[in-house]
Amino acid sequence: MIKKPYVQSAIFLGMLGMAVGAQAKDWPAPVKALEAKGVEVIGTFDAPGGLTGYAAMVEQQPLAIYLTADGKQAIFGTMIDAKGVDLSQEPLNRLVTKPLTAKIWKQLEGSTWIADGAKNAPRIVYTFTDPNCPYCNKFWSEARPWVTAGKVQLRHVMVGILRPNSPGKAAALLSAKDPQAALTQHEQQHRSGGVTPLDQIPPAVRTQLDANQALMQQLGFSATPTTLYKDTDGNLKTVQGAPSAEMLSRVLGPR
């Protein structure tokens, strides 16, 4: 578990190839040299000044690369025009951030989660939750004003990773007749242990928990809570750990 939230503003390098269908291509030599240094090239775009642009990722950050007209040199960084307008942002959003956001959001929608809040809430937030995680409980408690006001639906993607009885507790919540009510009761009684874990986890529920944990690992996360939301531009953002008071308004929107 993480005490202080780590904010990841870009999306996840490990998901990149699968998310946008990137395949190794016969890039020009300078671009290949950057690939050898760990840069993952996603696609190309037209750039001013006779340059060819390449949208890429490195160390979990989008990166614009510009190939000179003779194809012998590559420059990476932000291109601006005479008015100071960032010319790199749009192609990076279009070729890297937006497709990856759509792919990961669809995967989250297809995971096994417990809804916490109104079905018609205008804002959806996913959070990987372990029933034994005190910081998950802290986030649950601090999100109440948004959830009870109908502004946010939290979707708890249940995992069992912190303690030996975490899978049994997660399975008990997922197997409950009313999972949302069971989760609420569990969080309210978290300090005293919360839900009673199942001794035997049904195979179907075990499959769901395994798939949730696999998705969490695939996205590069190992701690709970890990929360995923969309910013005002529709780009995917993440917070690891219980969000700070300032971060809550970014994750959950205006109060």
Image: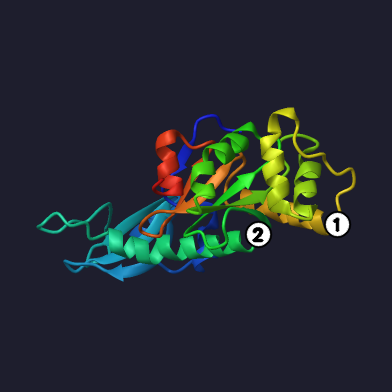
Question: Would you call the spot at circle 1 few (<14 residues within 10 Å), some (14-19), or many (20 or more)?
Answer: few
Q: Is residue 29 left or right of residue 143?
A: left
> Which of 173 and 28 lies nearest the eye of the viewer?
173
**Residue 170 coordinates in the image, percent (x, y):** 75, 46
- Sequence-earlier tag: 1 or 2: 2
Question: Would you call the spot at circle 2 few (<14 residues within 10 Å), some (14-19), or many (20 or more)?
Answer: some
Q: Residue at x 75, y 56 (%)?
A: 208
> Which of 241 and 121 lies nearest the eye of the viewer?
121
Type of amino acid under label 1 = Pro
Q: Is residue 56 left or right of residue 153?
A: left
What residue is shown with label 1?
203
**Residue 120 coordinates in the image, percent (x, y):** 53, 63
Q: Is residue 249 left or right of residue 91?
A: right
Q: Residue at x 71, y 34 (%)?
A: 189
Image mark for residue 234: none
> Which of 204 and 64 lies nearest the eye of the viewer?
204
Q: Residue at x 36, y 66 (%)?
A: 94
Q: Quadrant of the C terminus?
A: top left
Asked whether the residues under the numbered discs 1 and 2 touch, taking CB atoms below 8 Å apart as contact, a structural biologist would say: no
Distance Cα–Cα, label 1 vs label 2 = 16 Å
**Residue 99 coordinates in the image, percent (x, y):** 45, 66
Is residue 59 visible in the rendered structure shown here?
Answer: no
| Local SS, label 1 | helix
Type of amino acid under label 2 = Ser
What residue is shown with label 2?
111
Check the image and name the residue furthest to the front.
149
